[in-house]
Image: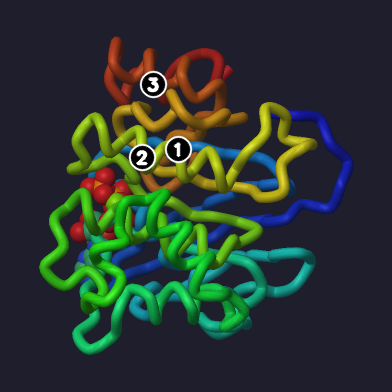
């Protein structure tokens, strides 16, 4: 983790979250500073999407205790749209389709209404979604098209903290390069101190990390962030030993 004394961009402390009365997150502590790119690993069903959904304020995620500050403000007290305006953006694992709302309109709204048509077209070219701009967002989009659509929306929004949920899942190798290029564009720069935006990227395979300079990885296990380290080293450990052994490793549990 880069050494810094600056006020964190995001600070999650002791976060407990339940869904339909079942506790999924059981004490998450996470600090992200401006410019840092973090990677979130963890087995299926461990709560990665739950954490991201809670941070953006989607309904159905009940925070039973803990706190979250974003730029020193109480994030949990803000509505979904206020969080987006404050600078938090989400690229969904499974992007929802919205009938009657075109991708171009979503990109315009995501940009806070301050984007011109040329910029929308430029982003659409970069993400190869130009042909989908006038279609209902995500309706009938293939898996890869929906992921590219998500990234186009995020590039339009340019959030200070981009939460990106499994950007490479269901995406072919050529398109992983397109999506990876867009994330690299958003989170550009080799050093965290030079980057304008921060990211939290969920991945199982780490393929996306060929394109992105990630600073630190975390393993979500048993409702908590059980382990922290170099993201590529963590993925190697998980591939070699499995999640259970990985989070028992002496480096994380001295
Ligand atoms: N709306 C819901 N109703 C009931 N349970 C839910 C709901 N949403 C999520 N859960 C449960 O919460 C747990 C965590 O789910 P979550 O989607 O956060 O996992 P994940 O770590 O993102 O998994 P994956 O790697 O498969 O995407 C799962 O057991 C899931 O079934
Ligand atoms: Mg998930």
The circle drawn on residue 133 is: none
| Residue at image location 25% in from the left, 32% down from the top | 174
Disc 1: CA contacts within 10 A as few (<14), some (14-19) or many (>=20): some
| Residue at which label 3 appears | 235
Circle 3 crowding by C-alpha within 10 Å: few under 14, some 14–19, many from 20: many
Determine if residue 185 is in view: yes
Nearest to viewer (mark 2 / mark 3): 2
Residue sitting at the far right: 5
Whether tag 2 and tag 3 are in contact, CB under 8 A, the answer is no
The numbered mark, 3 or 1, whose residue comes first in the sequence reads 1
Q: Which residue is mark 1?
A: 181
Instruction: Give how far across and how far down residue 126 sits, in percent.
Output: 42, 49
Q: Residue furthest bottom?
A: 100
Q: Say above or below: 120 vs 82.
A: above
Question: Which quadrant would the C terminus be assigned to in this image?
Answer: top right
Q: Which image quarter is the N terminus in?
A: top right
Residue 120 in the image: above or below residue 188: below
Pointer 1 and pointer 2: residues touching (CB < 8 Å)?
yes
> Which is in the foreground here, disc 3 or disc 1?
1
Compare residues 123 and 192 and report the one nearer the observer: 123
Q: Few, some or many C-alpha atoms within 10 Å of disc 2 (few <14, some 14-19, many ≥20)?
A: some
> According to the image, label 2 marks what residue?
178
């Amino acid at each position: 983790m880069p050494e810094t004394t600056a006020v964190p961009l995001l600070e999650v402390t002791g976060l407990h979250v339940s869904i339909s009365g079942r506790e999924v997150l059981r004490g998450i502590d996470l600090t992200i500073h401006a410019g840092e790119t973090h990677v979130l690993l963890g087995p299926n069903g461990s709560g990665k999407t739950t954490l991201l959904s809670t941070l953006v304020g989607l309904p159905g995620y009940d925070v039973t205790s803990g706190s979250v500050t974003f730029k020193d403000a109480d994030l949990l007290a803000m509505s979904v749209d206020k969080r987006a305006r404050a600078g938090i953006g989400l690229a969904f694992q499974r992007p929802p389709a919205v009938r009657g709302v075109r991708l171009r309109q979503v990109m315009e709204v995501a940009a806070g209404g301050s984007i011109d048509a040329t910029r929308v077209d430029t982003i659409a070219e970069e993400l190869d979604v130009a042909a989908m701009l006038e279609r209902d967002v995500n309706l009938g989009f293939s898996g890869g098209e929906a992921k590219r659509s998500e990234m186009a929306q995020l590039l339009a929004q340019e959030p200070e903290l981009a939460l990106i949920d499994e950007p490479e899942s269901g995406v072919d190798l050529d398109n992983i390069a397109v999506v990876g290029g867009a994330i690299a564009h958003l989170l550009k720069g080799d050093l965290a101190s030079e980057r304008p935006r921060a990211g939290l990227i969920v991945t199982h395979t780490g393929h996306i990390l060929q394109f992105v300079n990630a600073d630190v990885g975390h393993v979500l296990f048993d409702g908590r962030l059980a382990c922290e380290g170099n993201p590529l080293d963590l993925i190697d450990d998980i591939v070699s030993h499995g999640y259970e052994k990985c989070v028992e490793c002496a480096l994380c549990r001295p």
